[in-house]
Each structure stands twice: as structure tokens, then as C-alpha cells.
Image (cartoon, helix red, strand yellow):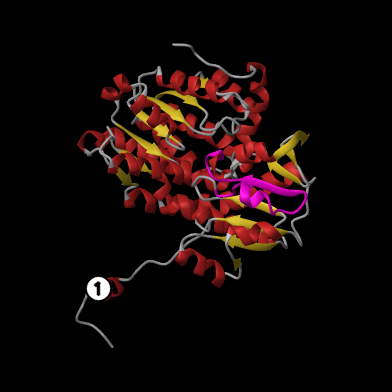
Amino acid sequence: MKRYDIKDISLAQKGRLKVEWAERNMPVLRLILERFKKEKPLRGVKISACLHVTTETANLMYTLVAGGAKVALCASNPLSTQDDVAATLVKDLGISVFSIKGESNRRYYQHIKGALEIKPEITMDDGADLVSTLHIKEKKLLANVIGGTEETTTGVVRLKSMEKHGVLRYPLISVNDSKTKHFFDNRYGTGQSTVDGILRATNLLLAGSKVVVAGYGWCGRGFAIKAKGMGADVIVTEVDPLKAIEAVMDGFRVMPMTEAAKVGDIFCTLTGDINVIQARHFKVMKDNAVVCNSGHFNVEIDILGLEKMAKRKRQIREFVTEYTLADGRRINLLADGRLVNLSAAEGHPACVMDMSFANQALSVEYLVKNGHRLKNKVYSVPEKIDSEIARLKLKSLGVKIDRLTPEQKRYLSAWELGT
């Protein structure tokens, strides 16, 4: 097996310091790491992980290795890798990393295959590209797999489709469905990091700007709230009537994308679906409109349609491609339509990823113990794990809460008692 494919091993020292900085804000994962060191619940288990190669992911890798696992890691997005973090994981932790920021689509899938050469018993995914590669191109490896985890909404949608069509070959735990993940990571993490990515890429002022948020799921509402907090005039587009009502009652204007396209200054898609912003929308956008995506894949924006419409394009800033249309209007695409929060910034803050990756670590432990008894389905994180992570997080924050008295417990379980 090839040991690694990264940009530059000499970046390890810089990455090491960044990983250490993130660890200070990941107290729950630290507690799990300390227990894993003692108990070695993952001793000898081979794990292929396809995740964003960031400082927070590095701390998850340290936890898995502390538990006795043998790990190979690749990126879950061609632009989300922090090259110095990849270097420190190879040099200091000795794991196989296949990940380079800006890698081509072809190399991206070569890296997934590199991570699979370990012949995994457990998979960890963020977007389900590794799982789909296993099921389509590396079927011979499926017999070894006990189970896997999935980090994000887009991946869970793909996995549930596989389950529905009867092609899923091993059990998967949807870490994304954990309350301690999507209530916090998706909302607060995506909200802050998406704002961060847009500002780093453009240096625009959000205050007074009309910001169009496509999709009002947990990620969309998180970004909408953060943009509003910075003074933006936020417009939401939706296809789900319930989410649209919620956006209205949260104080946002809601309208179809065809209408929003005419007035928006900054557009961000967070839906997980394809062609949310299309050529017909580009045709009516203002000159110098900014378009970006914070959903997992870059399919949410019809980039091919924009390419066809443009008479010329140029990179005007590091993460900004300017497309000039026939009438002279300019449309600015950020980070090639990839995850703007990870491509142009550093992704979610460590504090919130602490809970997400605690879910990953404990779900892997659960699969090692129980995977052989599970059916080939998509499962939620066990409620016991979810509650324990919340308890540990509160403890790390120094927050105490009340407990039900015996009388209160009896009342909640009784049907006879009323007024």
C-alpha cells in the first residue's frame, strides 16, 4: 500500500501547532481519547475515512489511533484539505493520508481508492463518495466491512436512497441525525463558517447587502441568522412550505429564486440538491453579484450554464472567478462552487466540531461492538450516545442543570393525573 499522497511533508510543524490549537476547544473528544487510550476498544480495527482534512478531523484521527485503530484518510472534497494538517498526520501520527487542496476530480477519486487499500472494517464518510465507490468499483472489499458512519445531510440522503433500492451492503450510522450534531454543527458551525468563507474570499460588507439564502434547513437557517446579525437584508428561497413558514416567522422575506435573483447581492445555496441556481437566474442578476455554495457538492449551482453564458472569465481574487456575460454584467463565483466555508476559510470552529466528532468516535466504537448484529440499513446515533455527549459538553462548559425529582418522574409517566 502506498503510504500517502500529500502536498508537502515539510508543512508538518505548522499543521502540528494548528491541530494543538483546535484541541484546546475539543474537551469532549479529549475525554473520549483518554478513555480510548486506556481501554483500546478499536484495537486492530482498520478504518477508511473520507472526511474534510482539517485541524478538527486531525483530533478525531488522534482519538481513533489512541483507541488502537489503523486509519487511512482521504479528503471528502477537492478544496477542503488543509495541506499542513495532512502533513502533520503523516509525519507525527504515521497514518496514510491521501489529500491535496485543489486536487483534480480524477485525483480525488484516486485518493479515495488509496484510502480503501487498507481493506477497511469500518468506513467514515462525509458525502458518501467513499461508500458509493466501495459499492460500485471496489465490491470485493465489501465482505470485510462491519459498518460505517456518515457525517453530512447530503451523504445521508444518498445512503437512504441506497437502502430504499436494496443495494446497501452494510449498516451505516447517520451521525448527521444526531441532535448534538445537526442542532449545533449544521446551524452554528455552518452559519459562522459560511460567513467567514464569503468574507475572506471577497472582503465585502454584509451590512446593507441583500443576501439570498437558498434552503432553510439547519445549515440555511444558521447562515441566515448570522448574516442577519451582521446587518444583511436576508431573503430565503424554499420548496418546503413548512420551512418557508418558519423562515417568515423568523423574520425573513421568502420568495422564489426567480424573484430573489433580481434583487440579491450575495447568493448562497445550502440545499443538497442540484441546479438550485440556474442559467435563467443568472440572466436577471445584478452586475457584480456574488454566488457561492455551502452545501456538500458543487452541483447546486449550474456552473456549466454560467460557463456557456459567459463571453470571458478570469480569476480576480484567490477564490473568486469573475464571469462576464454578453451584456457586460459580471457574476462572481466563489471557490468553484465548492463548500465556501471550507474552501475559502477553515470550516467549522473546533468547539462545535467537538460534539460532531465525539459522535463519530463513539459511533465507531458502537459499530465495532454491535455491527455484526445490525441489518444493512441507515441507523440514527443511539440516544444514549447523544445524551452522553450533551452531558459531557455541558460539564466542559461548567454548566449545571436540574434533575427530575421522583415525584416529577411519576407524574410524567402517569396517565391518571390531570388538573
Would you identify the image quadrant in which residue 101 lies? top right
Q: Residues within 10 Å of mark 1 (few under 14, many from 20)?
A: few
Q: Nearer the viewer, residue 253 or 83?
A: 253
Residue 365 higher or lower than 252, as above or below: above
**Left or right: 37 as drawn, with respect to 25:** left
Q: Residue at x 45, y 64 (%)?
A: 401
Q: Residue at x 56, y 20 (%)?
A: 92
Q: Residue at x 46, y 61 (%)?
A: 240
Quadrant location of the C terminus in the rendered image: bottom left
Residue type at mark 1 is: Arg
Q: Nearer the viewer, residue 150 or 402?
A: 150
Estimate the x, y position of residue 32 in percent, counting from the top left.
Answer: 43, 39
Q: Residue furthest front?
A: 326
Estimate the x, y position of residue 119 in percent, counting from the top left.
Answer: 35, 19
Is residue 59 within the magenta segment? no
Q: Residue furthest bottom?
A: 419
Specify start and end residues of the magenta stretch as a single range.
276-298
Is residue 297 within the magenta segment? yes
Specify whether residue 262 is in view: yes
Estimate the x, y position of residue 88 in percent, counting from the top left.
Answer: 59, 23
Specify whether residue 343 is in view: no
Would you identify the image quadrant in which residue 6 lies? top right
Determine whether the residue tagged by mark 1 lies in a helix, strand or loop.
helix
Quadrant location of the N terminus in the rendered image: top left
Q: Which residue is mark 1?
A: 410
